[in-house]
Amino acid sequence: MTESESLVLELRSNQNKIKLKCSAAAAEEENMSSSSRDSFSSLTPPPPLDWKFSQVFGETTPGEDLQDVDVVSSIGFEKSGDYLAVGDRGGRVVIFQAKHGKHTPNSFLNRNELERLDCAFTTHPEYQYKTEFQSHEPEFDYLKSMEIEEKINRVKWCSTSNGSLFILSTNDKTIKLWKVREKKVKKVREMEHHSVVCSENDLLGEGSFMSELDKPPTTNGYNLDWAEKIAKDTLSSQEVQTKIIHTEEATRANCRKVYAHAHDFNINSISNNSDGETFISSDDLRINLWNLEISDQCFNIIDMKPSNMEDLTEVITVAEFHPIHCNLLAYSSSRGFTRLVDMRQSAICDHSARILQDAECRGSKSFFTELIASISDMKFTYDGQHILTRDYMNLKLWDMRMDSSPVAVFKIHEHLRPKLSDLYNDDSIFDKFECCISGDGLHFATGSYSNNLRIFSHGVGNEEGITIEASKNPNRRSILHSTSRPRRSSLSNMARGFYRQGHENYRSGSNEFSCNLSSKLLHLAWHPTTNFIACASGNSLLMYHA
């Protein structure tokens, strides 16, 4: 074999090796792409969580009357989880801080302190009261002859690069931006005051001072100047006799911006954009885009108001920005639709890019079909790939790339389906339950009646999930009671209007329920970085960790 023939054979051998490597790489890439198309099914199922009671704030003692202004109406964690904001129906915002939230940088700590902090960080966080402020006051709209409640509908923390704490709070009509900051306050103790001791040439004591003032002033007024000098010296001598006890940090909240007069209907949600500069606010028919620095101007990006209000078929229930892409947002409606829109397509985003709708809901319909399909809350996972929605009956997990059906459905109130007519007459069918999602996107939680906290994990356990009664003593049983009670609807009157028209009251044979409808867990939030849930029952804030 010649040298040229051996080179040809070697080249062919190398080419065959390259082809084999390329085919292997292509096969591996195909496997990776196929697995990524079904990310949730390919993930290793998370271990089941063991939930335990952690803390409670504002617990009501037996026999104590619950004031309506003290009922919690909104909960929100700051992105690091170091702070927790709670709004109530009295227009107040209460802020809690994790005890390990702020500490000295690690470079200034010794070994024992580092070990102590490491132990604290591996366990669940513990919160303490930090401050509170009155965010909104009751108002009256004289043009519409309508009272505006002070109730806080939503609280949202703003992301900042310098570590400052900014929070957005809203009632039905007005949004406010607050800055929460700490001031160092010196506490002093006043010592016993004594008369000033001066030289023999100065007039001392109160009698001498007054007698000198009684003297007629000279042409140059020297004695008046002298009196002012003595007064200053007396003040300085008293200041010397005060002692600083200690210096402490006092937290204050200052209102920086007020975003008002932009919504004709009640605001139901606000959401911060990932760009840190803008946010959206939504009411029943419109969604407005705001710049945090401009309070007197906003842009209407979605308008669902028909030319004739009799043609109204659905209202907006919640809107949320995508956690990563600043141009994407989603909003849900009372018909059970979740629409994804891209603000780059047009200035008015009425034409949605994608509609998430459960195919099973397109079959036969009854009067209650749209009522129970109304989405009360919606959350993105932190990676922005999935959306969690909550309607009256179910908790649904959606993949943004698959709009025909949800990835998973967790049943919450299926046992109440035979009682929908009684729930409708009682207005309980309009209760708006919130939902939350863990930082890893694998666990979900929502509330129910009898103060029950429902927690689910994708791919772990049965469809029932975990049920915890939100109380300091979770073994306590709820008491059954009749549902005939006067209450205010949680859905706006305008939204309820077209459901009520032309329909008489429905009644079933019995109005006894297997749950307590007067005690409901509507508001909750999941810690951004750890398995820790804060939920509200009445005026009580309860916390659980796993």
Image: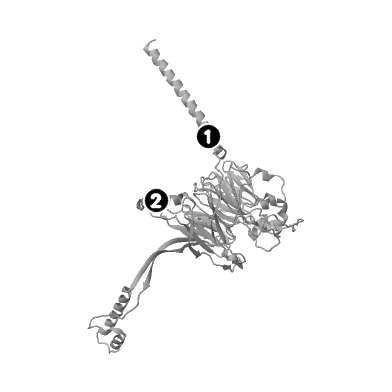
At 52% from the left edge and 34% from the top edge, which residue is drawn?
32
371 left or right, relative to 104: right
Residue drawn at point x = 25 percent, y = 80 percent = 198
Kindly identify which residue carries mark 1.
33
Of residue 186 and residue 32, the one placed in the foreground of this image is 186
Q: Earlier in the sequence, mark 1 or mark 2?
A: 1
Badge 2 marks a residue whose secondary structure is helix
Taking the image as shown, residue 88 lies to the left or right of residue 506, namely left
Horizontal side of 250 relative to 376 (left or right) equals left
Foreground residue among 351 and 221: 221
Q: Which residue is mark 2?
A: 114
Q: Residues within 10 Å of mark 2 (few under 14, many from 20)?
A: some
Q: Position of residue 353 (x, y in %)?
A: 57, 45
Q: Indicate the position of residue 427 as horizontal and vertical percent values.
A: 68, 59
The amino acid sitting under disc 2 is: Leu
Q: Residues within 10 Å of mark 1 (few under 14, many from 20)?
A: few
Q: Is residue 533 left or right of residue 2?
A: right
So how many labels did they put on this image?
Answer: 2
* Front disc: 1 or 2: 2
The amino acid type found where label 1 is placed reads: Ser
Residue 542 % position (x, y):
55, 57
Q: Quadrant of residue 103?
A: bottom left
Q: Quadrant of residue 479?
A: bottom right
**In the rendered image, which quarter contains the N terminus?**
top left
Q: Secondary structure at mark 1?
A: helix
Q: Which mark is residue 91?
A: none
Q: CA distance from mark 1 to mark 2?
A: 43 Å
Q: Is residue 248 above or below residue 208?
A: above
- Asked whether residue 388 is in view, the answer is yes
- Residue 496: x %, y % from top left: 66, 58
Query: Image quadrant of residue 252?
Result: bottom left
| Whether residue 153 can be seen here | no
